[in-house]
Amino acid sequence: MAHMASTTAPALTVGFDLDMTLIDSRPGIRACYQALSERTGTYIDADLAVTRLGPPLAEELINWFPEDRLEAMAELYRSMYPTFAIAATTAMTGAREAMDAVRAAGGRAIVVTAKYEPNARLHLEHLGIHPDEVIGNLWAEQKAEALREHTASVYVGDHVGDVRGARKADALSVAVATGPCSTEELTAAGADVVLADLMEFPAWLSGYRPARA
């Protein structure tokens, strides 16, 4: 009987994106880009950069640096990041409640992000948010690797890239309209559910569980 129960009701695993889903990293990332600009003497429009968070760092840096300097600049940015970005970053409204809702449902909460993994962990530790796993350096469709590996049935994110990752993993795509992508863009990308923010997530999850079972 126990074997049957385990095959019919696998443990719920919910994946979450990090930037603009669980954390508002705009002030911290803005400060880090400003510091990088000062350090390198290269103009970076930090206010513009923080309007398009989500994709990997190199996709932003290519707007400001020649290709042959990208790797060195990414390394420099990541090394400066803990000093400039961690303290300035806050949790998104509802982030802790969303994690708590997954745990209350007997589930596991994992973070799958394009961010450099050590810096992702620093953010979560600083804010006292404790997922079961943190997997970094994965963007868009690449996120499906981690979602599949951890058998996540739901992936929550704010970017159309997160929707693509969820779909590739055959996970339900729950989008929050708290990042650079509008409700319309997220819906058009194929999100199964679009919430205004994570405060709406616990109520949604409580309705999702009976549907699963």
Image: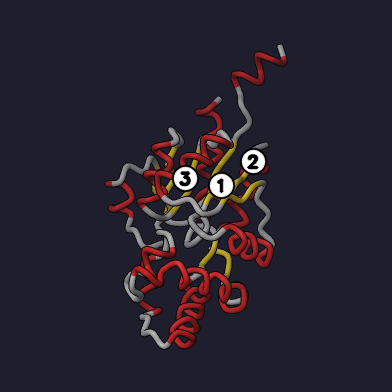
Q: What residue type is labelled 2?
A: Arg
Q: Farthest residue toward the front?
A: 68
Give how far across and how far down residue 211 sits, in percent.
Answer: 50, 28
From the viewer's perspective, is residue 205 above or below residue 94? Answer: above
- CA–CA distance in space, label 2 to label 3: 17 Å
From the viewer's perspective, is residue 62 above or below residue 144? Answer: below
Position of the N terminus, as image quadrant, is top right
Out of 21 and 144, give the one closest to the viewer.
144
Q: Farthest residue toward the top?
A: 1
Q: What residue type is labelled 1?
A: Pro
Q: Which of marks 2 and 3 is in front?
A: 3
Residue at disc 1, secondary structure: helix
Q: Name the residue under label 3.
A: 143
Out of 103 and 20, give the one closest to the viewer.
20
Q: In the rendered structure, are the residues bearing label 3 and label 1 in contact, judged by CB atoms less than 8 Å apart?
A: no
- CA–CA distance in space, label 3 to label 1: 23 Å
Q: In the rendered structure, are the residues bearing label 2 and label 3 in contact, judged by CB atoms less than 8 Å apart?
A: no
- The image's mark for residue 202 is 1
Q: Mark 2 points at which residue?
A: 108
Residue at disc 2, secondary structure: strand
Residue at disc 3, secondary structure: helix
Q: Earlier in the sequence, mark 3 or mark 1?
A: 3
Q: Earlier in the sequence, mark 2 or mark 3?
A: 2
